[in-house]
């Protein structure tokens, strides 16, 4: 299967206004939603990368949209999913219009997470201009950052993403059944990490800024606004990301960093890390 990147995600939130303020502190643009009372987060030349939609009863990751190169690739992906026993639905004209894509299919992963595979993102040709002075975000062919998902069916999930969707394992953290599995679908070290847990949950999504100053200024803005910082500045040993984590209004984290490495599949060797950070990423005391 020819999945190229994490194109977008959708998150269910209870407090849209709080998310508007939080998104501005992150240095992202916000644009009105064409379909509901939520809004969309813009970080590059695409119309959006995150759909924030109101949900009074549930909060967290609503769906993830994975990009394929064209319509034949989408048709091939649908056939492969059906051959693997997965239920596949073609996205309606209204759904495609709402997502701003030429075509999509809908399915679920083994945890029950809604997945959308799409092609043909429709550009609005509006430049990204951060309201807080962030110089830009690393996206393009690498897609939107990454997501880290807790799953109650880790073995089935790893099999689904690697053997059916075609992701490659980047590396592991842990041992045996407790592995955290980092996977990639392009040179970004990981677009998806899977963590064994009792239920499906979004641990965090990541935004990669262009410079260390973008990271530092954003950390200062969030602290000044009283936003909880769940892990202070630090560097990961696997993707080498220099980052910090803040707690979103919905309770899950957003990682904000810079300097992530790129993987060359011809030379990369999978390994296992023994700790999540080389330095830093300290949690608040008390």
Image: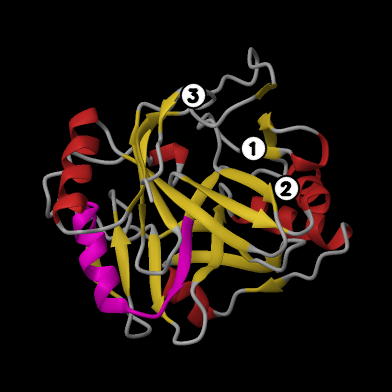
Q: Which residue is tagged 3?
A: 262
Instruction: Please report contact status of discs 2 and 1: CB closer than 8 Å, yes or no.
Output: yes
Q: Secondary structure at mark 3?
A: loop
Q: CA distance from mark 2 to mark 3?
A: 20 Å
Q: Which residue does the image show at 20% across and 45% down from the upper left?
A: 218
Residue 83 vs residue 115, the one in the foreground: 115
Contact (Cβ within 8 Å) of mark 2 with mark 3: no
Q: Is residue 108 magenta?
A: no
Instruction: From the image, tell me which residue sits under label 1.
Output: 183
The residue under the point 69% across, 65% down is 199
Asked where in the image residue 87 lies, by quadrant, the reply is bottom right
**Mark 3 crowdedness (10 Å alpha carbons): few <14, some 14-19, many ≥20:** some
Note whether residue 137 is visible: yes
Compute the Cα span from label 3 to label 1. Answer: 13 Å
Upstream in the sequence, badge 2 or badge 3? Answer: 2
Residue range (magenta)? 8-29
In the image: residue 54, left or right of residue 184 = left
């Amino acid at each position: 299967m020819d999945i190229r990147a994490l194109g977008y995600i959708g998150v269910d939130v209870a407090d849209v206004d709080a998310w508007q303020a939080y998104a501005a502190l992150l240095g992202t643009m916000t644009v009105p939603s064409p379909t509901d009372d939520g809004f969309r987060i813009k970080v590059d030349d695409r119309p959006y990368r995150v759909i924030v939609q109101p949900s009074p009863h549930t909060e967290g990751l609503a769906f993830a949209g994975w990009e394929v190169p064209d319509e034949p690739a989408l048709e091939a992906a649908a056939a492969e999913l059906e051959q693997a026993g997965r239920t596949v639905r073609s996205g309606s004209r209204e759904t495609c219009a709402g997502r701003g894509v030429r075509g999509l299919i809908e399915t679920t992963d083994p945890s029950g997470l809604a997945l959308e595979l799409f092609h043909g993102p429709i550009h609005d040709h509006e430049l990204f201009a951060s309201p807080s002075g962030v110089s830009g975000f690393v996206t393009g062919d690498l897609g939107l950052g990454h997501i880290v998902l807790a799953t109650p069916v880790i073995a089935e999930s790893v099999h689904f993403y690697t053997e059916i969707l075609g992701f490659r394992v980047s590396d592991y953290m842990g041992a045996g059944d407790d592995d955290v599995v980092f996977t990639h679908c392009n040179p970004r070290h990981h677009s998806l990490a899977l963590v064994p847990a009792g239920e499906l949950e979004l641990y965090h999504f990541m935004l990669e800024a262009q410079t260390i100053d973008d990271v530092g200024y954003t950390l200062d803005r969030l602290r000044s606004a009283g936003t909880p910082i769940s892990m202070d500045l630090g560097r990961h040993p696997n993707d080498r990301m220099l980052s910090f984590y803040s707690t979103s209004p919905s309770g899950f984290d957003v990682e904000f960093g810079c300097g992530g490495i790129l993987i060359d599949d011809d030379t990369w060797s999978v390994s296992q890390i023994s700790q999540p950070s080389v330095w830093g990423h300290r949690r608040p005391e008390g």
